[in-house]
Image: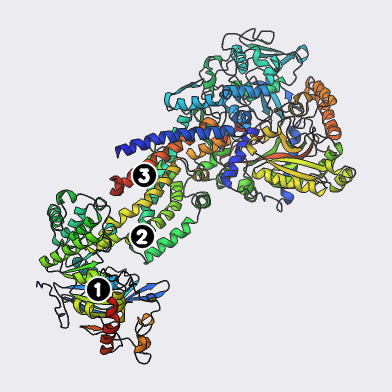
Amino acid sequence: MLQFIIRRTVGAFVTLFLIGAATFFLFVAAPSDYASLACGKDCSPQRLADIREALGLNLPLAQQFWHFMSGIVTGRDFPAGHCSAPCLGVSFYSGDMVWSTIMDRFPLTLTLTAGGAVVFLLIGVGAGMLAAYRRGTLVDKVATGGSMVLSSFQIYFLGPVVLTILVYSTGWMEDPRYVPITQDPVGWFVGMSIPVCVMATIFTAQYTRMARSSMIEQLAEDHVRTARAKGMSRRYVFLRYAWRGSLIPIVTVLGIDVSSMLGGAVVTELTFSLQGIGRLAVDGAVNKDLPLTMGVMLFGAFFILLINILTDITYAWIDPRIRLS
Amino acid sequence: MTTVTKAEGAPAPTGPDGFLSVRDLQVTFSTEDGPVKAVDGLSFDLHRGRTLGIVGESGSGKSVTNLTILGLHDPLFTTIDGEIVLDGKELITATEKEMEKLRGNRVAMIFQDPLTALSPFYTIGRQIAEPYMKHTGASKKAAWERAVDMLAKVGIPNPKERARDYPHQFSGGMRQRAMIAMALVCDPDLLIADEPTTALDVTVQAQILDLLKDLQREFGTAIVFITHDLGVIADMADDIMVMYAGRAVERGTVTEVLRSPQHPYTWGLLNSMPRLDSDLGTPLAPIPGTPPSLLTPPPGCRFHPRCTFRDRVGGNRCATERPPLGPDRSSACHLSAEQKQTIFVEEIRPRLG
Amino acid sequence: MMSHRARGARAVVIAIAAGSLALTACSKNEGGKSGKDSKKDQKQAAVQSKAVTYVDAAGSTGPAKEVPGAKPGGTITVYQEPGLSHLDPGQIYVSDSGQVANLLFRRLTQFQEDDKGNVSVVGDLATDSGKSSDGGKTWTYTLKDGVKDENGNPITSADIRHSVERLYAKFIFDGPTYLQTWLSGADYRKALPGGGFDGKHLPASVLDTPDDKTVVFHFDQPRPDLPQTLAMAGYAVVPAKGDTKEKYEKKPVATGPYKIAENKVGKTLKLVKNTNWDPKTDSVRHQYVDGFTFQFGVTESTQTKRLIADEGDNKNAIQLTGSVDATQIQDVINDPDASKRTVKGYQPYVMTLTFNLDRVKDKKVREAVTYAVNSKSLIAGEGGAYGGDVAPNYFAPTLPGYEPSYDPYGRLKTPQGNIAKAKEILGGVPAAQKKLVFAYPNSEQGQRRKVAIEDALTKVGIDVVAKEVDAASYYEQIGKLKNPYDIYITGWGQDWPSPGTVVTPIYDGSQVFDGSANYSHVKDPKVDALIKKALTQEPAEAASTWKEAQHYLLENVIPAAPLWYTKQFQLSGSNVGGARYGSVSSLIDITRLYLKS
């Protein structure tokens, strides 16, 4: 197991490097760079050259790339100050350290992700399991029908509708906003409750359907029947035998969802005017802000790889066949 | 508990009911295409210490029957009629709680594929100990020791260590031994073995069958042995019931049925079985046609569309009238007893060699 | 030119956010009401377009005239979508940072507007708008007494010299370059590579500080616009003592009524009162509210929804440079409560269909296209009467010298285009000349414009080949001298109220180079001569020269077909008092706001 984790971690670093290289060279292959964008409409060649030099865009590409990648490990010095490792450079647009910008936005993204995951795992998986347990009953029909309807909604539709109802027309709630939990736990909870719930609602529907079908599939497994034939109660079999097997597809999808959400929930953030990692990614791309884009990409990729490894470890915990082979 | 050693050719015990008694069992599944009558009017008895072999093709209703005895059918899609009486207790109307107390305790089951039938998530020891704890109220530790004992009993070497292994760490034969240990951990009165050797190598198969026979001798368990393999049944069973399309078509002692089968379907089964002592040139004679769809079963005798002897029966009886099956040695066929005898002796036996 | 960059970035983000921006606005409903509004806007613009007056010391002393009903206290919330790119004054050119700079930084001069919208230039750090001598080649400024920065250090002439000299350093690259170029030529950086940080300074023959209170600029030709130039945020003071160079962006030293308490770029910016700002030295700015909280990343659509709803904190909110979301214009107009809270007026931008003169050489084609274009359908796509107005010529209503009735192509009478006339002119033109390659940005807005242009030109028999261009780098693509396009829509607005900041950058022959704003590549000796002449004239005198230049361009050269003037339409919360349209910023006047309760 340890060897497996080490092997995967090394692989992840290689992948990160490749993702960084791909992002960098795709980005600089684009027809325009930040300097010409910043130079604007009345752009003399001299002014353009000044901007390029100020941003370090005049250096050879390989050197720019090397500076960026090595800076992550060793840190870098910029005119605006020292950027300690892990240094993701300085944003062209804002002049801020990309790492500190990401760290500033990350709590919101983490809140969205963790809050959303708690809601849709508890409610979604719970409802799906209950529906499977009470298959064919009213509970099942409500859960299946409800999740069918909800999963056809999209955040950019449900979000504004909920906002209009709860905020703009009735004034029952304030506009969504992010307050650090360390500063004001109640404000944090209230401020993020609409975005978290709206996002979780859509995921809940997916997880309900997935948990239900996965559970039903598991209940038809031979070993589940064996457990029943041993005289174990339906509940016991459900919670001990079937549940465990049904976790595998849920963990797989959860891993994908969570890692992509940690990389930024662009639509949710835009819908609720929140400032998370997703927004940074959009800003980076729109403003041709190379360091910011690189930083956000690598940050997101890091989570995808990390959660990939965690998912595999979870598989091993769930299934001894993986653990012991 | 009476212990009866199997006697070659011993007559089937008569009487209205045995230890397990099934009467006019009807099992209907509702499917998207309509109701499917998987078992249609099945009756049989089983006495303590004896083994009933149930033979038939896939889909003949033999596995369904046994899942129904344990109450493991899906209640959402299944309707059941008739009665199942185990040691005087009616099971169809029993509550789920009562059934739970029965399962794994008085009635145990061994499934066909030990790889899928054992949970991959828990150790062998735990899976064996679990029903023991539940049914005897034993402590975790006592149950574990019992599991290790059982593993030793079914011939697992080094049982103390192996109890901590997971099923995937066992070989196929060992898994089936573990499965048997699990089934017998509470000394059941009735053991239902659903094709327990089909998934195994031939050499392992023989070991498992010997094990079952030894254990039956030791515990006096009644066994329902389901298989489509007539060779296995000859080795294992006291009595035989042949099933076709949800109905029993022939029954009798193992000798009776195998030595002088009376039903055209049984003849077909025997005919299609390869024999070591037959000439290499003799072709196998599979039963013509395919098993009927249970959505729209053929009227009358369900076997009649495939039966080569139906024109020897007068009129159109085979297609209109269901042939009855008696409680003892009998076969559900409209051919007269003489016809059956003559056809078997003159036309079938020579081909069997 | 102002604000184009922020607009570009914002357009893309909105397109992503909203998915579709169906601009159905006011095709039916605009009727009489908006027509009346339009007239009112024009009246306001007429005031706006008067030549700016330069004010003496008496008019430059504080405190500023009280805003009627104003009360102190409270915090105003400011909504904005894109983050501010700069807070170092030397880097500030665009209007979002410019608005914030009005609260934070003082310059030698500043613009002052009266209740009627008349704009004048007053002394800000200086006692007056400046004294010129030597025929306008030398300008002398005397600093007011008692002006301090947020740390309590008095502002001296050395600070002014430093603020100018640091503009020569390489890390300043995004701000205006007028002053540097006027003082040291186009290659100004070579005159002072160290930007004054290394102890080397500009010679006294260029920039002189004879004593602590006096600053003298020497130019090689008359610079009558200097007082307006110095009023730009880009020329605000950076006290020598607190200059942290590249790091200054993060925490600049305030001299205005507010200072920065917290700055998270692209997320939040919190301003609090600067207690070292003395109202007695400032004739324009107020310090009614305790502070401003800027929230970035709020889309125009959300800004509008929040401000229409006017709930809770939104009552105290304003928009920075964003305007009412085009799809919600009707919601605002039809809501009597919301429509009371709007601020509207002309922006300084004139949108034109520009000809690439290197490729469209036949004047007849340019003339015909100028007749054919459909301003009406283009404006409908910009949000209708609240988004724009028909432009009959090149001068915006905000520009001194604006002539509302100068309409050589009958645009006001036939805003949908004069098809017959265009066809008539095209009569003898060979088919090969009638094929025009049209470049448009691949945004929602660009798509709508493309349809309108294609429709109009196809009607008169022109073969339009539409080519899509990446929206973010649109101006860069068409700014290339050897670009492969014949026609493209461009917009330009004044840097200060003088035609010199319009005609010079876009029609001067010396401006034909890669990346320049002279998108038509016009290089006409007569135009160049008129520009040269006007630049050295006093504003009133220059007006007639600029007029001659415009008439000659529009009638004889036709480098572009005027299409529409852009308009501003902003909303503020019901508790915000003192909201009015600022002619110079073309946005809500942020220096005079207060909260009613």
Residue holding disc 2: A217
> Which badge, 3 or 2, is on the more N-terminal residue?
2
Q: Residue furthest bottom?
A: B315
Query: In terms of image quadrants, where is residue A41?
Result: top right
Q: Please tell me how crowded label 3 is: few (under 14), some (14-19), or many (20+) other residues with Cα within 10 Å.
A: some
* Three-letter amino acid code of the residue under disc 1: Ile
Residue B299 makes an appearance in the image = yes
Foreground tag (2 vs 1)? 1
- Measure how far apart labels 3 and 1 are at the Cα level: 46 Å
Residue depicted at x 67% and y 50%: C25
Q: Residue furthest right?
A: C428
* Three-letter amino acid code of the residue under disc 3: Thr
Query: In terms of image quadrants, where is residue A243?
Result: bottom left
Question: Could you say whether the residue bearing mark 1 is in a helix, strand or loop?
Answer: strand
Relative side of C336 to C49, left or right: left
- Measure how far apart labels 3 and 2 are at the Cα level: 21 Å
Question: Could you say whether the residue bearing mark 2 is in a helix, strand or loop?
Answer: helix
Viewer-closest of B177 and B266 = B266
Query: What chain does mark 3 sit on?
Result: A
- Measure how far apart labels 2 and 1 are at the Cα level: 29 Å
In the image, residue B74 sits, relative to residue C359, either above or below, namely below
Residue C307, image x, y percentages: 57, 44
What numbered label is drawn on residue A311? 3
